[in-house]
Amino acid sequence: MEPGWLLWGAAVLLLLLHVLAELSPAVGFVLRLGWYCLLCVLGSLLAVPACLLLNGGRTVRNMRIIKNIVKAFKYFFGLKFEVKGLENFEVEGPAIVVSNHQSILDMMGLMEVLPDNCVQVGKKELLYTGIVGLIMYLGGVIFINRKSTTSAKMVMSEVAKTMVAENVKVWVYPEGTRNCTGDFLPFKKGAFHLAIQAQVPVIPVVYSSFTSFYNPKTKLFTSGKIKVEILPPIETKGLTSDDVSDLTDRCYHTMRETFFVLSGRPSPSEQWGPDQPDVWCGTALLV
Ligand SMILES: CCCCCCCCCCCCCC(=O)SCCNC(=O)CCNC(=O)[C@H](O)C(C)(C)COP(=O)(O)OP(=O)(O)OC[C@H]1O[C@@H](n2cnc3c(N)ncnc32)[C@H](O)[C@@H]1OP(=O)(O)O
Ligand SMILES: CCCCCCCC/C=C\CCCCCCCC(=O)OC[C@@H](O)COP(=O)(O)O
């Protein structure tokens, strides 16, 4: 087939998909999410050889390459980021970064502000997403088995040692799972154990609610603006394992308050524990 016909075919297909997306929000949602996944695969196809050629294998230095590729994704979805407090990342040495986790789209917000020498903690299932898993591995993502508390805790304790030795920051989603309810889930304590064990500061990062432009329940995925605020570091020097709960509570409350301010919504009555609202984790694509 001639290249001219191929181009015409692609253009007609794109137009058809665009019309379908406009006619049905559900179709639009699936198409946009599919396009996001495809972008992740294409981005990884580009990043894997670049990482191997420039840095030779698994290293946090690859995150810079990944970051620069992923930062372009937002233009395909009409997403804008408004970032405040980047200077709070400028702490000497290692730190634990904690942030809220609403969707697989968070990866764009993560790369928008990611400081140098920073790796994320991710569930081990992500390693099996083909080339996307490979790029996460090459970028230095720390994989944990959420089905085994003992093994997850062992990995985290090891990280407490290596992050200091290798001077890296570690990004943890303390909710432990995606949560697009417009509120926070209770925080798990792993990140705070890690910060106290390594005696490094905790840097909270808050993203405003996605619910106005992204809602898997109502199949909404349009363009939108995300406000991001990096809060001042919280020191942990001198704290012991007895202080983990207090540190967790402090971060939770500060971040949740900031979340409602950034989202332009009043804070609902505080909830903690089993009375949480329905949890909706976005898409079942990534189990
Ligand atoms: C182009 C493509 C590019 C790709 C880009 C790549 C970007 C990559 C982006 C990737 C993004 C990926 C994003 C993702 O994948 S997010 C999903 C994965 N991430 C997480 O789950 C992180 C948050 N979870 C935690 O921190 C949990 O606490 C862990 C996982 C550690 C255990 O959870 P679990 O549910 O099993 O247990 P529990 O929390 O009930 O805790 C049980 C007890 O243990 C205590 N305890 C906990 N920890 C420690 C410790 N270290 N030392 C001593 N004690 C510890 C704890 O206080 C509690 O005791 P008590 O207080 O009740 O007495
Ligand atoms: C041969 C492999 C076949 C699998 C093909 C899958 C292709 C997937 C392509 C693109 C996926 C986009 C990956 C974006 C990474 C975002 C990481 C993320 O946000 O993971 C969710 C995790 O934080 C929490 O998981 P849960 O909410 O607990 O669940």
Image (tube, rainbow, N blue to C red):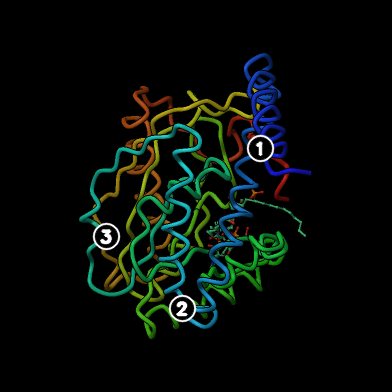
Quadrant assignment for ligand 1: bottom right
Residue marked by disc 3: 89
In this rendering, position of residue 102 left or right of residue 235: right
Relative to the observer, which residue lies in front, 235 or 83?
A: 83
Residue marked by disc 1: 7
Residue marked by disc 2: 54
Residue type at mark 2 is Leu
Residue type at mark 1 is Leu
Residue type at mark 3 is Phe
Chain-order first, disc 1 or disc 2:
1
Q: Mark 1 and mark 3: span between their CA atoms?
A: 46 Å
265 lies above or below 68: above
Which residue sits furthest right? Answer: 1
Location of residue 226 by image quarter: top left
Q: Secondary structure at mark 1?
A: helix
Residue 184 percent across, percent down from the top left? 49, 38
Residue 234 percent across, percent down from the top left? 27, 59
Q: Residue at x 58, y 66 (%)?
A: 135
161 lies above or below 91: below
